Image: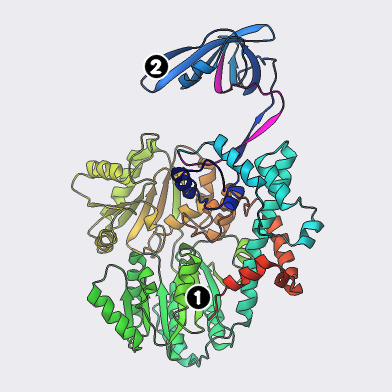
Amino acid sequence: MIKGLGEKTVKLLNQCGIYRAEDLLTYYPYRYEVFNPTDVLTLSGEFIQTVNVLVESEPVVSYIRRNFNTLRFRVSALNKVFQVSIFNRAFMKPHIEVGKKITIIGRYDEKKNTFLASDIKLKAITSLQIKPVYHLVRGLKNANFEKWLQEVMKLPMDLDVKIPFEIEKRYHFISQTEAFGAIHFPKCAEDVKRAKVRFIYEELFEFMFKIMYLKEKETKAIGLPHVISDEKVNDFVLSLPFELTKDQKQALADGLQDLKSEKRMNRLLLGDVGSGKTIVAFILMYANVLSGYQSVLMAPTEILATQHYQSCKKFFDQYPVRIELLVGSMKASEKKKVFSDLSNQEVDIVIGTHALLNDQVVFANLGLVVTDEQHRFGVNQRKNLQNKGYRSDVLYLSATPIPRTYALTIYGDMDTSMIATKPQGRKPVRTLIKKEADVKEILQAIYHEFQLGHQIYVVAPMIEESEMDDLKDVHFLKEKFELAFRDKVNVGVLHGKMKASEKDQVMKSFEKGEIQILISTTVIEVGVDVPNATMIVIFNAERFGLATLHQLRGRVGRNNLQSTCILISNQEVERLKVLEESNDGFYISEKDFELRGQGDLFGVEQSGDMSFKMADLKRDYKILLQAKNDVIDYLKSGDYFQSAYYRDLTNKIDFTN
């Protein structure tokens, strides 16, 4: 038990995800402050200095305004006397006494002979110190956090050992206990480096263990027997008002082979925006229905689910396939009817949102589970839907293009099909980079599209205006656009804080053409399909990763008309030029990965599937590959049966029925 932890402090620690003493140890610093003290004042204001000084005068506090003060006093260092100033440290005045030795950290201005301090240590630092800094919620202090860590380090704890002993020995990793001491209380930079190497490998080894163990289980998983009429499937494909691309045909062949084989399907269909993944999923769902099973498709938003439902109804209008929609905004009576029809197998295909996870959703004979934008659902959500069937096949769809090498590693437990080619007749979206000073030219381009009868998306990175910067929010932009176009154009607003029913109403109005300009946040990033929209204007484009911008750009160019994407930014123009150069999402994702790392790889939400505390997939990719090879050997040897941690982990990882 840690001393001095009251109920209030415990709640604050819980907000940081700290519930047990062990959690403190794995709450790593996000940076370090290095203090290398000297009593020699460097005559340069370019560098932060740590200087030991002698206080020469009583400190004086002056108030600039309420809650903002300056503390000033004179000090000396090697017979040089100068003034020290520090903001908002009035509380330190009684502790700064004439003749006392202290340490000041900050910058020296030779012309003014003043030292602007960022921090003051009341006890002089006499040797090199490395201080960890933690991301803490308001109410918690680094100094107290260090004391609690010191107490925890003294406690006898049976910590989970995540790196097998033989591997730890092979790579000469420091022990787990040594690593915790080195990461939280380093004596030198080498301590931090050695600890980080261990913890990075540890995280990636555990991550790859889960993936490779799942792959091993999925390889052995027996699927449902399917008897599929190739003739009926081919007839449906030929009835489509367009021809499938080469990549679509290959993805379909992969999926049909999965359904026909004894092995259970566990496939990821990766496709660029507008590449036609959904129709491939519909055909596979139809093939599954032909075998006597039910199919389900879960989408992350009601807008996307409704869109899929309407498309599916249209494609199967002349076929004896019963299709239903299930979303949260439906009336209780409507949901009840769907529940009943599903359990009685009066529905062949159901398309919906999280509402499908309701306990009242019981399938009579579920054969195929399709999850659209799979990264937007947590692992447990995907598993819960799959478990509503017995040995159900699983197909994941994702429009988030990521580098192929990373995809094969990160999604190593799944078979992967990729659609890179766009449907015939689609013109590449023209991308232009503009500055805010070009606003008149941009407004003219928007009005020209409106006169042609087309619609326009406008994207803002925020919902409400911030006093800290000039980011354009949706409401501010709405006012400006209404002022610019007077009553000639109907302007709508869409953002994530709106109720589902409100968002649905706005999108319906936009789809019907009642709204000509839709000002939105990134809520339109995935799936929304309005063929008449031919222009998208993105403000503060530098705030987004290239992959996200490409996703947003994919909202236009969904017909045979020439579409345009305008990126407005007063900075980072060179980075944005990648989008001018290419419409290839996989090429762009490679560039985005090089420039930004893993953070933007899966968009805004990662659902906790890849929440690393120390590792970074881009920076540590070589370590990831090595960990993968080590895991493969570890699984083959069967040594994990001797590890309490990994034996327990395999019991928890059960994605099969």
Identify the magenta region.
115-138
- For this rendering, which residue is in front, 380 or 646? 646
In front: label 2 or label 1: 2
Q: Answer yes or no: is residue 276 visible.
A: no
Q: Which element type, helix, strand or loop, lies under badge 1? A: strand
Which picture quadrant has residue 99?
top right
Percent across and percent down for residue 517 are 28, 52
Magenta segment includes 121: yes
Foreground pick, 82 / 327: 82
Residue 382 to residue 461: above or below? below
In the rendered image, which quarter is residue 505 located in? bottom left
Q: Position of residue 69 (x, y in %)?
A: 43, 18
The residue that mark 1 highlights is 395
Residue designated by label 2: 64
Give the residue at the far left of this rendering.
Answer: 487
Left or right position of 586 against 329: right
Residue 478 is situated, as x and y percent measured from the top left of the image, at 27, 45
Q: Give the amino acid at mark 1.
A: Leu
Q: Amino acid at mark 2?
A: Ile
